[in-house]
Image: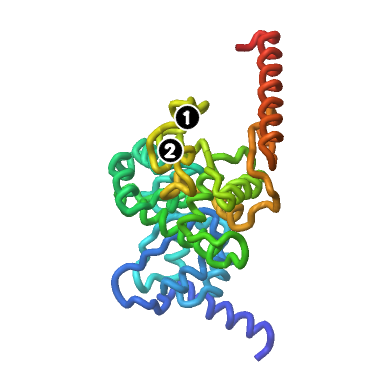
């Protein structure tokens, strides 16, 4: 067969594939598929093939490219009818789901904050969500990212979707870590949640993780302010001495070691910081006047850094007053 005829034949076969119904793994009913925010067309095609929505990931990618849908596949939670043609699948993914509500969950949000955001968007009651998270011990295991939740879902389905995303994004990273501290998954996520709340910049996370790991090795109290804030029930700026005496197993000023569980939803960078901390013997860190932290290895150095911070803060406040700012 000549080359032009080969091209024509291939095009005819491909066109037939688009409109025909591919053989799916499930003969009847619907197939549920979750497409996360930011997932590539290549990854989406693999998921569709694994779930039995399409017969071939390669053909689906080619169809998406030919039809111009490659860069317009919308994230969301879909229900595809078994036997749907590839064109129908593509059309559904391009249109998105009409029932979806876009929800952004920032890194460092606690279950309480997530519940409040879900309630504000009309998805479920905050109290119901928080009770469910407490009952299933999901604090810290609700992955922070952008979701498209079906508006008809309840707290349980939303929490499960977030837990599934954690399993997809975080658990393989922890399982693949060949070196690093000898910590369980719960301990890794617990420490990562503290790092998440402490870090002023992404670049500081490995150093902050190292400080807490060094403290654990030396049997020192962690004395992490975010754990006290979690015990208080809200993120409070400027803790008092009374706050530091708050009676709670989460208060690391009163109890040795890690708290019983995570205090927020850490991002992947915080988890990776715990698995691969900075190479430092620092056991202290204090804020500097530039929005970062100063890391030190002795109490004397730490006290000097604190004194410098207070002096610089005083100078900044005086400069603001002179400029007529409150």
Identify which residue is drawn at 60% across, 80% down.
Answer: 8
Res 291 → quadrant: top right
Residue 45: x %, y % from top left: 51, 68
Depth check, front residue: 76 or 118: 118
- Which residue is disc 1 drawn over? 236
Q: Residues within 10 Å of mark 1 (few under 14, many from 20)?
A: some
The answer to whether 162 is drawn above or below residue 108 in the figure is: below
Can residue 145 be seen in the rendering of this structure?
no
Identify which residue is drawn at 35% across, 72% down.
Answer: 82
Residue 154: x %, y % from top left: 29, 49
Quarter of the image with the N terminus is: bottom right
Res 52 → quadrant: bottom left
Identify which residue is drawn at 52% across, 73% down.
Answer: 57
Query: Mark 1 to mark 2: distance in Å?
Result: 9 Å
Q: Is 142 displayed left or right of 73 in the figure?
A: left
- How many marks are shown on the rendered structure? 2
Residue 126: x %, y % from top left: 32, 39
Kindly state the secondary structure of the residue where label 1 is placed: loop
Depth check, front residue: 250 or 265: 250
- Which residue is disc 2 drawn over? 230
Query: What colouring does the structure picture have?
Result: rainbow
Q: Residues within 10 Å of mark 2 (few under 14, many from 20)?
A: some
Q: Earlier in the sequence, mark 1 or mark 2?
A: 2
The answer to whether 110 is drawn above or below residue 138 in the figure is: above
Depth check, front residue: 143 or 246: 246
């Amino acid at each position: 067969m000549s080359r032009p005829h080969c091209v024509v034949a291939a095009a005819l076969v491909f066109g037939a594939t688009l409109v025909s119904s591919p053989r799916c793994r499930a003969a009847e009913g619907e197939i549920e598929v979750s497409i996360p925010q930011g997932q590539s067309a290549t990854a989406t095609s693999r998921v569709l093939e694994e779930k039995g929505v399409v017969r071939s990931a390669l053909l689906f990618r080619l169809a998406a490219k030919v039809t111009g849908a490659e860069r317009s596949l919308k994230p969301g939670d879909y229900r595809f009818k078994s036997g749907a043609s590839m064109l129908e699948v593509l059309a559904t993914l391009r249109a998105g789901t009409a029932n979806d509500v876009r929800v952004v969950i920032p890194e460092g949000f606690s279950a309480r904050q997530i519940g409040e955001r879900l309630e504000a968007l009309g998805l479920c009651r905050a109290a119901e969500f928080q009770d469910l998270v407490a009952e299933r011990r999901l604090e810290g295991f609700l992955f922070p990212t952008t979701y498209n939740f079906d508006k008809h879902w309840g707290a349980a389905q939303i929490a499960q979707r977030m837990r599934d995303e954690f399993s997809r994004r975080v658990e393989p990273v922890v399982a693949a870590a060949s070196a690093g501290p000898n910590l369980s998954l719960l301990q890794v996520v617990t420490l990562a949640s503290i790092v998440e709340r402490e870090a002023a910049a992404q670049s500081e996370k490995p150093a902050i993780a190292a400080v807490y790991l060094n403290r654990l090795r030396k049997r020192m109290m962690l004395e992490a302010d975010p754990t006290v804030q979690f015990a208080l029930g809200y993120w409070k700026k400027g803790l008092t001495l009374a706050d530091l005496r708050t009676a709670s197993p989460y208060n690391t000023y009163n109890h040795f070691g890690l708290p019983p569980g995570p205090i927020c939803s850490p991002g992947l960078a915080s988890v990776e910081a715990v698995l691969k901390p900075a190479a430092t013997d620092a056991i202290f860190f204090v804020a500097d006047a530039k929005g970062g932290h100063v890391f030190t290895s002795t109490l004397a150095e730490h006290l000097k850094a604190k004194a410098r911070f207070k002096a610089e803060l005083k100078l900044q406040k005086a400069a603001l007053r002179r400029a007529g700012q409150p």
